[in-house]
Amino acid sequence: MRRKTNNPKNPRRHLGVHRNSLRVNSRLFSQKLRRRLKKEEATHRAEAEIMDQTSTKNKQGWVRFGSPLSVVETNLHFGIRDFTRLKIRQLKGRRKYCVMELGCGPGDSLAELKTEFGVNVRTIGLVLKKTSGIKYNGVDKLLEEDIHRLKLKESPDFIYTHFGSLDKTALKRDALEKVIHWLRPGGTAVLHFGETTPEAMKEIKSTLVMYGITWHMPRFSDVIIFTKH
């Protein structure tokens, strides 16, 4: 009768060890995936609660959202605060870094930037109509106009929109061309287009190609990020 040995070169023994290792790795991966999904679900739930808590309606029926900058950054897949800090450092005090938000609501995210960077940043907010009772603290210049009729005399370094004017307008290509013309050379735009038809998105991309602009779209989003050269 052949005795079993603990020979490490036994192929059957190694095969069993390999299978056990696969089971352990698979179990660990599943646990990590479940934890990640729970974390993402909690984050989305927190964002939804913040949006519910900060949404208000005035007597004229205008709806505004006072989203914290962290929520704006999450939805745009872009670190506005860190990006602004980097650009201000690169300017070395030569001038103010100009940030513009399209459809800024009460200007809460701009106010956060103004609070953190002070005189180093100039904030511009665009609204279709001012909301009564809002002081727009932290917004250096508030523009009350439709984006298609606005004639901007400044050239912002950074333009962004978060559930703002671009996802409401049907003339998305015209609005995009406005942003491209307004941007200072070397400036960056982070634009949320909302629910956009394939035809409209094709026009948007063809416009960027026409201006020789390379863009980036975060996965599973309606956000386009680009820099004007």
Image: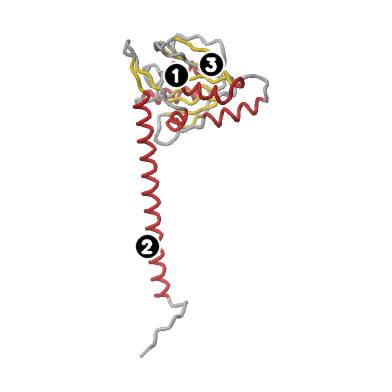
Residue type at mark 1: give it: Cys
Residue type at mark 3: give it: Trp
Q: Where is residue 24 in the image (x, y as percent from the top left)?
A: 39, 62
Among the two numbered marks 3 and 2 on one chain, the one whose residue lies closer to the N terminus: 2
Is 72 situated above or below 41?
above
* Label 2 crowd bin: few (<14), some (14–19), many (20+), radius 10 Å: few
* Label 3 crowd bin: few (<14), some (14–19), many (20+), radius 10 Å: some
Q: Position of residue 165 (x, y in %)?
A: 41, 18
Q: Residue 23 carries which label?
A: 2
* Label 1 crowd bin: few (<14), some (14–19), many (20+), radius 10 Å: many
* Secondary structure of the residue carrying numbered label 2: helix
Among the two numbered marks 2 and 1 on one chain, the one whose residue lies closer to the N terminus: 2
Query: Could you tell me which residue is drawn at 57 percent across and 23 percent down?
Result: 187
Q: Which mark is residue 182?
A: 3
Q: Where is residue 84 in the image (x, y as percent from the top left)?
A: 57, 27
In the rendered image, the quadrant that contains the C terminus is top right
Task: Check contact, mark 2 vs mark 1: CB within 8 A.
Answer: no
Among the two numbered marks 3 and 1 on one chain, the one whose residue lies closer to the N terminus: 1
Q: How many marks?
A: 3
Is 139 situated above or below 46?
above
Per the model, the C-alpha gap separating discs 3 and 2 is 57 Å
Question: How is the structure coloured here?
Answer: secondary structure
Per the model, the C-alpha gap separating discs 2 and 1 is 51 Å
> Horizontal placement of 215 versus 85: left or right?
left
Q: Residue 137 carries which label?
A: none
Q: Which picture quadrant has residue 133?
A: top left
User: Is any part of residue 68 visible from this angle?
Assistant: yes
Of circles 3 and 1, the one toward us is 1
Query: Dot 1 corresponds to which residue?
Result: 104
